[in-house]
Image (cartoon, rainbow, N blue to C red):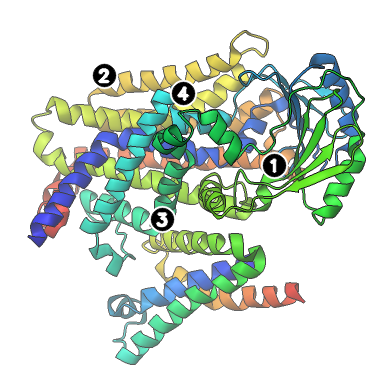
Amino acid sequence: MISLVVALSYSGFVALYLAKPKHYREFFKAQPSSNRTLLLRCLGWLALGAALIPAVLADGWQIGPVLWIAVLSSTVTLLVFFLPYQQRLLLRLPLVLLPTTLLAALVTSQ
Amino acid sequence: MKDNFRQAMAWLHTWSGLVFTWLLFAIFFTGTLSFYRNEITLWMQPELHTVAPEFAPEAAIGGALAELHRRAPDAKSWNLTLPTTRDAALTVSWDDGGKFDRAATFSVDPHSGTLLQPRATLGGSFFRSFHFSLMWGNFGIWIVGIATLVMLVALLTGIVIHKKIFKDFFTFRPHKAQARSWLDAHNASSVLSLPFILMITYTGLATLMFTWMPAAVGVMYQGDKKVFQREAFARREAPPRDSQAAPLAALPPLLEQTRAHWQGALLGRVVIHNPGAANALIDIVRWRGSTMTARLDPIMRFNGVSGALEQELINDSGAKNTYGVFYGLHVAWFADFFLRGLLFGMGCAGCAMIASGAILWTVKRRAKHAAARGLGYRLVEALNVAGIAGLMLACAVYFWANRLLPVGIDGRIAWEQRCLFIAWLLALVHAMWRGNSSAAWREQLWTAAALTALLPVLNAATGGLALPHAIWQGHWRLAGVDLMALFFAILLAWSGWRIGLQKDAAQSGRPSIKTAVNQTSTPIKNTEQYV
């Protein structure tokens, strides 16, 4: 469950990062349409919000929100500080991170 | 008007930040270490490294009580702190009604009840005490209170002047000119961990609010803080000791009953009031890490002679709960292994914010003042070196002193701390004497890195459980301290290496700090230039 909190939060911030046309161009080498930007922004915020669900499932309503905010802050800090060094790897990571943690969460909650 | 406002805020941010920066860094750094207070204390007591935890220490309680009967038969109360996931030993203390006395405490093995002999040390508790009192009693608490208010001012003014970065906070450009990347580092570390930093600063004020805002208690209770504390928190108050003696009820069934009542919750403490008297009371307190609110853990109170349940004391006040949540958020007793790591990481981000801000101040003024080398500028540079690198060096020395000071000497606890403060003072003298700040930075960072890197070796060589063994046995709370030391060593060495690189570049005429600093006066525009 906690790994899913991390994955959702991290992926959300990656989406928000790519929602900036400047960063999008840098990564995809193409001009984003305004729909694409909006979609990325919605997905990003949605993922950040959704990360609260596994956090509360893991730690309850008292400590869950604390965990959620702590994970949000930590993932974005790591993302920002390592982006200049490993941009391509870090921006592709959600493609691996999301499915595996989702699967792990489903398997362990059975 | 708007620009004037931002300029005023920038001025306030710069100067309030600068004046308190070293104090705030020390508070933040030692406070961050306090998240691992128990683990550091364990590391510093190698005598306890091989004690395995036992959460149902019924077998050991007999031994503990026998020792208490021998040492303090007439105590006001006996206190057994049961093993938890963070402390393996069963810690016993007693209260004679006077001030807390460190000598009135001992540890027993949670399996057998035999007496353990850990060395005298404050361990990680030193960092905790230092971060709110500077080891200076009430006077220190007041200084920390003022510094905390200044921290809030610096945070809020920082939000005003750096508000641009909220729009695009994915900005960190380590390869740009020096002032630019320091500014990025300062901005990024503060914005990203801002929720944590605001929370910890504000709740820090809440934890000691009765010291900092004594007026209400002073008026309502005629200045008698004790009465207030008793009414508000110390629900464990017991009647005066009865002169008639009576044997104490057996503890194990009561522990069993309490565990069943709280659905298997971990128990934190057993407090026995008036032990041996006819009006003895036994309080069993739930483990403090089980909820977010601190200082309000539920208590099951039993008759100390018959063992009958008298009442369950639960907090039912909204005001107390609010205070308990603030307090609980600050001390984070609830945090498990993962969350504790995150909180520690964000504490480090807070330290990075303060340190980068302090360094930014000198980097921005280096071009202008380096030639003149005014006294004020040199003082700030020296204090930066000693306040940041010197403090980490001094903390490493504290760990070394813990292992190298002979176990039996008098005043061992005080000497451990003296070693830290002497090392810190020497770091300041060195930084002032060295003059050249990049050399001072490098030398202190490298020394700190070497001392920290060797801590796992020191641990293994002086009777501790060696890192490979600790990992092999899955003793992560102990291995974690060694691993953290290695991590900090790498960080310190890397910083020293980076500073060395910059110096080499400056000497060989490649793109250097000097040219980099000269460039910065143009690209940094708007309010940021006042920062």
Q: Could you tell me which chain the residue with mark 1 belongs to? A: B
Q: Which numbered disc flags the more N-terminal residue, 4 or 2?
A: 4
Q: Which mark is residue B135?
A: 4
Q: Could you tell me which chain the residue with mark 2 belongs to? A: B
Front: mark 4 or 2: 4
Q: Residues within 10 Å of mark 1 (few under 14, many from 20)?
A: some
Above/below status of B67 relative to B344: above
Using the rendered image of the protein, determine whether residue A32 is visible from the camera's viewpoint. Answer: yes
Front: mark 1 or 4: 4
| Distance of label 1 from label 4 (alpha carbons) | 25 Å
Q: Which numbered disc flags the more N-terminal residue, 3 or 4?
A: 4
Relative to A27, B53 lies left or right: right
**Contact? badges 3 and 4 (CB < 8 Å):** no
Q: Tell me the kind of residue under disc 2.
A: Trp
Name the residue that disc number 1 marks. B86
Q: Tell me the kind of residue under disc 3.
A: Ser
Front: mark 3 or 4: 4
Name the residue that disc number 3 marks. B193
Relative to B274, B515 lies left or right: left
Name the residue that disc number 2 marks. B433
Q: Which mark is residue B225?
A: none
Residue A2: x, y in percent? 62, 65
| Distance of label 3 from label 4 (alpha carbons) | 28 Å
